[in-house]
Amino acid sequence: MTRAAIAFFGLGALGAVLAARLVAAGHRLAAFDPQPAALAAHHAACGPGLANAAACTVWISCVTDEAAAEALYFGVGGLIERLPGGALAIDHTTTGPGFARRLGAALAARALGFVDCPLSGGLGGARAGKLLALQAARCAQARDAAAVLAAYCSRITRLGAAGSGQTAKLANQLAIAGTLRGLHEAARLARAGGLDVGTLLEALGAGSAHSAQMDQHAGALAEGERAFGARFGWIAKDLQLARAELRAVGADVGMAGWLLERIAAAEAG
């Protein structure tokens, strides 16, 4: 595998794992995060790395949400102004498709490469190097990115132009949210009927109800409504993006709208 000089932005829970796997794969990293503790933890685990991003040919972002990505790329002193000629930007942040299209156009205007590349598989998949990359890029840029993505992705699916990756990720999140809600309701029924939720989930896991979401959230489901509610809230921001995209294309907001209403009601209660 070709070793690359990479500027990596965003050392949160997922980003820290991705950055560590890139270093373990032999890539050279210049890592950045606005939180000093996150940056210190990365350096403690992976070494000091490259001192700056000037010589990096690949720039990867994995930040919390679209607002953070907006500030990172388009804010004062943002990456749009700092990316060196010929560099390739790969964005793993989950955003709306419109943002990805706008970012791709801004980078193309400067003759810079862009891969719209949200990920699926969670922290477990990241640690195991088995994430799915939902990639949207031109052929040459997708090929150049593949050598880097191999550090943490076992499958890369190319979907089309910038924005396509984010549309696919939001579809993925809708599917996950539906499964999570179904599990929530199943646990509620079991608890109301006097069943031990943990025992029930273990049994259901051997049948057609088994899912990755059941594996990941069985413990919280068994603990009760409050514990699972805390786990469920994280997907709200992605459901908001999905609802906005459905509205933008004139489609019924369907389950995304209903689930957001349920999350808001739970938080209010």
Image: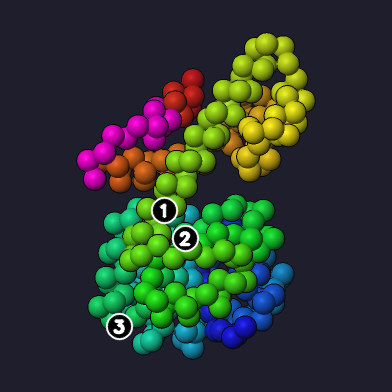
Viewer-proximal residue among 174 and 4: 174
**Image position of 217 (left or right of 165):** right
63 is higher (above) or lower (below) than 217: below
Q: Earlier in the sequence, mark 3 or mark 2?
A: 3
Residue type highlighted by circle 3: Ala
Q: Looking at the figure, which quarter contains the N terminus?
A: bottom right
The Cα–Cα distance between marks 3 and 2, rounded to whole angstroms, is 23 Å
Secondary element type, mark 2: strand
Viewer-proximal residue among 175 and 122: 175
Q: Provide the residue designation for mark 2.
A: 134
Give the crowd class for mark 1: few <14, some 14-19, many >=20 residues within 10 Å: some
Viewer-proximal residue among 140 and 237: 140
Residue type highlighted by circle 2: Leu
Residue 264 appears anywhere in the view: no
Residue 165 appears anywhere in the view: yes
For residue 27: magenta? Answer: no
Residue found 52% across the figure and 75% down from its top: 146
Q: Which mark is residue 111?
A: 3
> For residue 191, what is the image quadrant?
top right
The Cα–Cα distance between marks 2 and 1, rounded to whole angstroms, is 7 Å
Q: Are marks 3 and 2 in contact (CB under 8 Å)?
A: no
Magenta residues span 248-261
Residue found 48% across the figure and 41% down from its top: 175
Q: Are marks 2 and 1 in contact (CB under 8 Å)?
A: yes
Q: Provide the residue designation for mark 1.
A: 168
> For residue 74, what is the image quadrant?
bottom left
The Cα–Cα distance between marks 1 and 3, rounded to whole angstroms, is 26 Å
Residue type highlighted by circle 1: Ala
